[in-house]
Image (tube, rainbow, N blue to C red):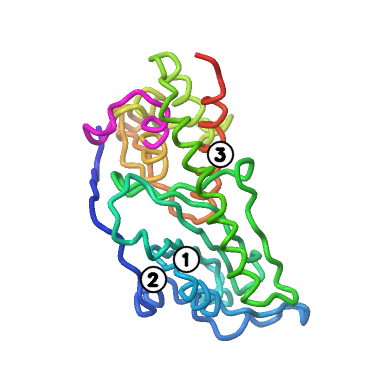
Amino acid sequence: MIRNTVTSNFKAEALTDETLRLEAPSIFANRPMSGLSQRYAFVPTTEIIAGLRGKDWLPVHVEQQRVRTATRIGFQKHLIRFRRSEQMQTLDEWNAELVLTNSHDAGCAYLMQVGIYRRLCSNGLVVSDDTFEAIRFRHAGLKADEVVQASFRILEYVPNVGALIDRFRSRQLNDAEALKFAGQALALRFPAGQEAPIEPLTLLTARRPEDQASDLWTLYNRVQEHLVRGGLSDSHRTRSGRVRSLRGLRGIDSKVILNKELWKLAETTANQVN
């Protein structure tokens, strides 16, 4: 059983500063969190956003980490996805994105990664570090322009992304291979010692007719969407009688880590001879 099925065909819209502030106020911190080392160089995320906008990278998605410590509120980790302005009005099956992560509490460095947006299911993917090593900038003597200039490395890598997706598309999986992939993917989210709430076979369920193909690209996106969004159940019950279901991931780190590991698994599968 699948809940919260969503199909998206909309063109992208750039997020305004008003929306960014509403969804992730920590982006607009005008100073670092109190108590940090004097070596910590504060570079406002707003400066990076302004610089990237000037180079035709527009923000299309934003979120911030939930924190419990009061002193971290307003300074916590935030993630912003950017897309090229020339791709905003296209209806391509997928678009390359720049994924920027930062915090103003010394919780992480500026981190730039390659992302992919799949329009059909509104999936936001992140390429593994084995494919494209994330670009990290320490908060020490950092200048905003360094991050902006590094964004061009993402553009240089886009053809490689397209070539990898073509490889995924050309790799057809039989039933046994598909089930093996689903089992390995489920184990990434529920490692040894953690009992998964669903069976691997349930991950192969398609949310929409367009996702019923047996190629690796389609299967990978199908599985990724289930594992990240949740809302999946195969009617198994707990000892108390409650129906077990797969919950969606909410944390920035948990989603990015899983995405990278899934991409790595897809690459490994693509390299295997069927």
Task: Using the numbered discs, state the Cα–Cα distance from disc 1 to disc 2 in whole angstroms.
Answer: 7 Å
| Residue 230: image location, x then y, percent | 36, 42
235 vs 97, nearest the viewer: 97
Amino acid type, label 2: Glu
Determine whether, in the image, residue 37 is placed left or right of residue 131: right
Callout 1–callout 2 Cβ contact below 8 Å: yes
Residue at 58% from the left image edge and 70% from the top image edge: 148
First in residue order: circle 1 vs circle 3: 1
- Dot label at residue 261: 3
- Residue 154 figure quarter: bottom right
Q: Specify the segment rendered in magenta.
A: 206-221
Residue at 45% from the left image edge and 69% from the top image edge: 56
Quadrant of the frame with the N terminus = top left
Q: Secondary structure at mark 1?
A: strand
Q: Which residue is mark 1?
A: 64
Q: Residues within 10 Å of mark 3 (few under 14, many from 20)?
A: some
Q: Which residue is mark 2?
A: 23
270 vs 28, nearest the viewer: 270
